[in-house]
Image (cartoon, rainbow, N blue to C red):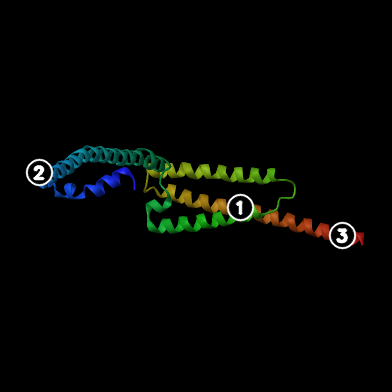
């Protein structure tokens, strides 16, 4: 045992006999209540600051969405799907067919080099710039049948061009294979 424990053990009766002054428990409860109220009062400004930060974030997000995202999408113009449900189905059909042809072209093996492939895709994207102009015109005149028909004809023309290119590439590929087979058969 150390000295403190020895002292407490020897003077135990004298130490246990002393009672706290009267009202000790009431003063202790009042002190706890004041401390509890003080912590509630202190936390209120922090809550107000946090709420104001949240409100600022929400308002700035709404402003950004309204001014940046929505305005950039509306600056691209209307699509056929925005005009009516029937045109939405037409647009969906043509976009899926165009994407299918893009995938076929992308998988085609260009004999000479990839520069030709890159040029082809650049030309196709130039065709898309025409469509973007039509979308902007449709935004200014949403019910103009001439613009809607021009957009549909654009899809049809693009598919026709892509089919023609694919046909030509397949024909070249087949001729190359036939020439290769003929060359190999003459070697034997």
Residue extending furthest toward the front = 10
- Nearer mark to the viewer, of 3 and 1: 3
| Percent position of residue 116, x then y | 68, 44
- The answer to whether marks 2 and 3 mark residues whose Cβ atoms lie closer than 8 Å is no
The residue that disc 3 covers is 184
Q: CA distance from mark 3 to mark 1?
A: 33 Å
Q: Residue at x 22, y 40 (%)?
A: 43
Q: Residue at x 41, y 50 (%)?
A: 145
Left or right of residue 94: residue 57: left
Quarter of the rendering containing residue 101: bottom right
Disc on res. 21: 2
Disc on res. 162: 1
For label 1, the SS is helix
- The answer to whether marks 1 and 2 mark residues whose Cβ atoms lie closer than 8 Å is no
Q: CA distance from mark 2 to mark 3?
A: 115 Å
- Nearer mark to the viewer, of 1 and 2: 2
Left or right of residue 165: residue 37: left
Along the viewing direction, whichever of 39 and 152 lies nearer the viewer: 39
| Percent position of residue 113, x then y | 72, 45
- Residue 164 visible: no
Along the viewing direction, whichever of 65 and 152 lies nearer the viewer: 65
| Percent position of residue 19, x then y | 12, 47
For marks 2 and 3, the one nearer the N-term is 2
Q: CA distance from mark 1 to mark 2?
A: 99 Å
For marks 1 and 2, the one nearer the N-term is 2
Along the viewing direction, whichever of 187 and 52 lies nearer the viewer: 52
């Amino acid at each position: 045992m150390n000295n403190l424990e020895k002292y407490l053990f020897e003077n135990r009766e004298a130490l246990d006999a002393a009672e706290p002054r009267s009202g000790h428990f009431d003063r202790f409860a009042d002190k706890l209540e004041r401390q509890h109220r003080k912590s509630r009062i202190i936390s209120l400004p922090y809550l107000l600051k946090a709420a104001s930060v949240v409100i600022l974030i929400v308002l700035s997000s709404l402003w950004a969405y309204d001014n940046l995202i929505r305005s950039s999408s509306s600056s691209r113009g209307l699509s056929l799907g925005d005009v009516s449900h029937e045109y939405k189905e037409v647009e969906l059909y043509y976009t899926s067919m165009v994407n299918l042809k893009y995938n076929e072209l992308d998988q085609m093996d260009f004999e000479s080099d990839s520069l030709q492939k890159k040029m082809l895709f650049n030309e196709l994207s130039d065709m898309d710039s025409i469509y973007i102009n039509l979308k902007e015109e449709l935004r200014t005149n949403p019910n103009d049948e001439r613009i809607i028909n021009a957009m549909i004809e654009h899809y049809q023309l693009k598919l026709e061009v892509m089919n023609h290119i694919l046909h030509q590439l397949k024909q070249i590929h087949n001729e190359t294979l036939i020439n290769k087979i003929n060359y190999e058969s003459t070697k034997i």
